[in-house]
Image (tube, rainbow, N blue to C red):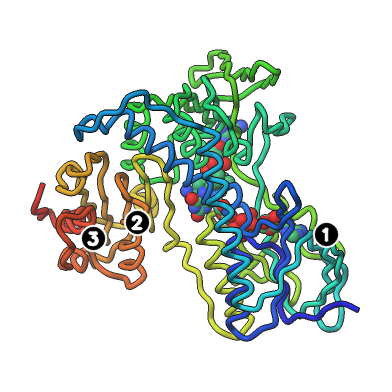
Amino acid sequence: MSQQFDVIVIGAGPGGYIAAIRAAQLGYNVACIDEWASADGQPMLGGTCTNVGCIPSKALLQSSEHFEHAAKHFGEHGISLKDLKIDVPKMVARKAAVVKQNNDGILYLFKKNKVTFFHGRGSFVKAVQSGYEIAVAGAKPETLTGQQIIVATGSSARALPGLPFDEENVLSNDGALRIQAAPKTLGLIGSGVIGLEMGSVWRRLGAQVTVLEALPTFLGAVDEQIAKEAKKAFDKQGLKIELGVKVGEVKSTKKGVTVAYTNAKGEAQTLAVDKLIVSIGRVPNTTGLNAEAVGLKLGERGDIVVDADCKTNLPGVWAVGDEVRGPMQAHKAEEDGVAVAERIAGQHGHVDFNLVPSVIYTSPEIAGVGQTEQQLKAAGVKYKAGTFPFLANGRARALGDTTGMVKFLADAATDEILGVHIIGPMASELIAEACVAMAFRASSEDIARICHAHPSLSESTKEAALAVDKRTLNF
Ligand code: FAD
Ligand code: NAI
């Protein structure tokens, strides 16, 4: 006899667990299935984000940033340290403890919201009169029936053709977060978000890092002016980034990895490194779902095809997060999840991709929301731009972190804010003000007229808004 639920969510990453909680808040009887397990078979809720993504990467970024500050910047504050050392296994163990707190936090939230959790792989069995039958393959196999199904199975690292991850020498994001000693030399394929964040961690801890990127432009999706600043900062830090390369044969032996590639000038090169991280994007997790059993439509990339409302081709089956269209970001997956739960309840859940911020947690941090200058130019939109450098901000000077700027783009006629781009300290936090302003369709003058605390980094946001009208006060 199968257990009946109103809503079954497959996957407990940020898309799935948030959808499950929101559906439960709306009064539904909800089950959530997730297969992620620790080495001893315990459930690890939270998906890629919690286990091998957002949370552990930020823990290592924090530890490595502390180390770099202690090594390079404490002296300016009159603090001297002798025999500074980093205990990498301890750093990695701290990261694991942070992950565990988040895993347990989600289990607690499920109990609080009365979401029933099943540990194992969820897959479609068949359509039935009351919805769909879903099998759970795990230590305790179960069959569930749900009226509404939300698929939130996420994504996994894409490997180079013919080069599977061994997680010893050739690493995905998973292995990259478990390295136990800083390698002397580290190679990364792909200078996207993971390449820059992971490259930064291991560079700070002493690795000589080389990043090989296929595209001729650096961070093509980021506002060009901001991307240029970022490249300058990374060059200065010694992060070697080669653009426009064509990666050829990669050989992995016990001693390390060699990558044959052609550089932008067409010259044949070889990179020999102790370890190689391959960060060339991610592929949707849909192979274990038995989608064919019910005729769930998949796209060419193995993604689940959905409409603007996250509806699949099947009545009562929805899909959210990394395995559907849109940016692969945890907060976008969460927004999808909330919107779908609300649509199931007959409400009007809505996600505006233009207002989904993106952040790269390097130092300096890079954050943006809305349109970039190159996008506005391409669309023929008339705009005004204003920038303010952190060099002229008192708080940034006191922090000793003056790299970068805040940039505003506003409509030339109406002054409505069209995009905000930040490179610099705490850009990840500062961008929230821009998201709020743009959600309320504020003008740059609105921000320029709001009192911001002094001294604070957020004054740079106000000053950049003033710069749109060419009337900065501190620059
Ligand atoms: P996932 O988090 O991938 O979760 C899917 C879950 O479904 C997993 O637990 C999986 O085990 C489970 N599952 C899959 N198939 C089945 C099945 N058949 N049955 C049962 N369970 C199944 N995004 C940000 O916004 N900010 C960041 O700072 C950030 N940092 C990142 C750093 C790294 C190194 C990586 C790799 C990613 C990062 N991301 C970040 C991206 C973010 O992790 C993803 O966008 C997010 O996790 C997507 O959420 P999701 O719920 O769609 O999928
Ligand atoms: P990405 O899409 O950010 O970058 C991949 C890079 O690899 C691109 O620049 C691409 O041109 C390059 N590339 C692809 N094939 C290549 C090849 N054969 N040789 C050389 N270069 C090649 O993907 P990444 O870094 O793997 O991250 C995956 C996803 O995870 C991203 O979509 C991102 O949104 C998410 N993520 C988000 C973070 C955040 O929000 N802070 C942090 C880390 C990941």
Q: The residue under label 2 is which amino acid type?
A: Glu
Q: Is residue 299 visible?
A: no
Judged by depth in the image, the label closer to the viewer, 2 or 1, is: 1
In the image, residue 226 sits, relative to residue 258, either above or below, namely below
Identify the secondary structure beneath mark 3. loop
Q: Which residue in the structure is indicated by mark 1?
A: 138
Residue appearing at x 85%, y 64% in the figure = 140
Q: Earlier in the sequence, mark 2 or mark 3?
A: 3
Locate residue 56, reporting x and y percent: 53, 47
Q: The residue under label 1 is which amino acid type?
A: Gly
Marks 3 and 1, how far apart at CA? 58 Å
Identify the secondary structure beneath mark 2. helix
Q: Earlier in the sequence, mark 2 or mark 1?
A: 1
Q: Which residue in the structure is indicated by mark 2?
A: 429
Near-viewer residue (163 or 122): 122
Near-viewer residue (381 or 100): 100
Residue appearing at x 18%, y 66% in the figure = 445
Near-viewer residue (232 or 236): 236
Q: Residues within 10 Å of mark 1 (few under 14, many from 20)?
A: some
Q: Residues within 10 Å of mark 3 (few under 14, many from 20)?
A: some
Marks 2 and 3, how far apart at CA? 27 Å
Residue appearing at x 73%, y 77% in the figure = 148
Locate residue 275, reporting x and y percent: 60, 25
Q: Which residue in the structure is indicated by mark 3?
A: 412
Q: The residue under label 3 is which amino acid type?
A: Ala
Residue appearing at x 58%, y 32% in the figure = 179
Residues at circles 2 and 1 in contact by the CB criterion of under 8 Å: no
